[in-house]
Image (tube, rainbow, N blue to C red):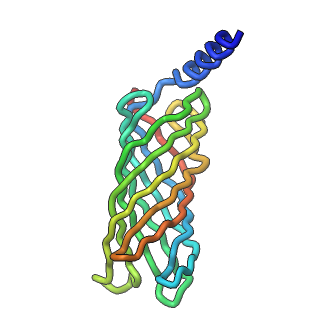
Amino acid sequence: MRFTFFSALLLSTSLLAQETASRFEAYGGYSFGYQKRDRLSIYGTNNGWIGAFKVNLNQRIGVVGEAGGQFDFGRTEPRRTQTYLFGPEFNAVRTRHLTVNFRATAGSIREDNNPFRFGDSTYAFASSLGGNVDIRLSDHLAWRVIQPEVVFTKFGSRYEPNLRASTGLVFHFGR
């Protein structure tokens, strides 16, 4: 009896993942961040954009390159950050209407404490852990309902875990 139940469960989960992945994906959307503002551990919110391009190597693994920008104009000096991240993305669930992925990326972050002054930029290491939930709208279009991430940055000896969530459209092409 147990063997039959576990066999049916294993077969049903493998059937869920049988939906064919497109070869390429392009994503663009709105990004909301909860980011450390200064060395005094004061956090603030910011808004921005995010864009990514993904190549699916097979049904389960893809490689994603991502760029994003966050803007914080709620202080005496405005702050702008831009991230450039690259890494693997793993498909956890893929059905006809729903896709759930998890990713780990690494790259760099650029911080401008005053975006109106040229040359006032700092570059540092950045990495992120997160995932996304996509709802398929058509064969070539999906809505990324949420992409939550923890973005880790290290400016000198200043280590900052920041939160970021985004939503937008995913375009699928190539089979």
- The front one of 58 and 80 is 58
Give coordinates of residue 90: x percent, y percent: 45, 38
Give the vertical position of 32 relative to 16 (above or below).
below
Outermost residue on the bottom side: it is 76
Question: From the image, which quarter does the C terminus lie in?
Answer: top left
Question: From the image, which quarter does the N terminus lie in?
Answer: top right
User: For the point 40% across and 76% down, which residue is it?
Assistant: 158
Outermost residue on the left side: it is 119
User: For the point 44% across and 66% down, which residue is it?
Assistant: 69
Instruction: Give the side of residue 132 with respect to residue 104, left or right.
Output: right
- The front one of 36 and 135 is 36
Give the vertical position of 165 relative to 98 (above or below).
below
User: For the point 56% across and 54% down, which residue is it?
Assistant: 148
Q: Quadrant of residue 110?
A: bottom left
Give coordinates of residue 83: x percent, y percent: 39, 63
Give coordinates of residue 115: x percent, y percent: 39, 81
Give coordinates of residue 71: x percent, y percent: 49, 73
Q: Quadrant of residue 57?
A: top left
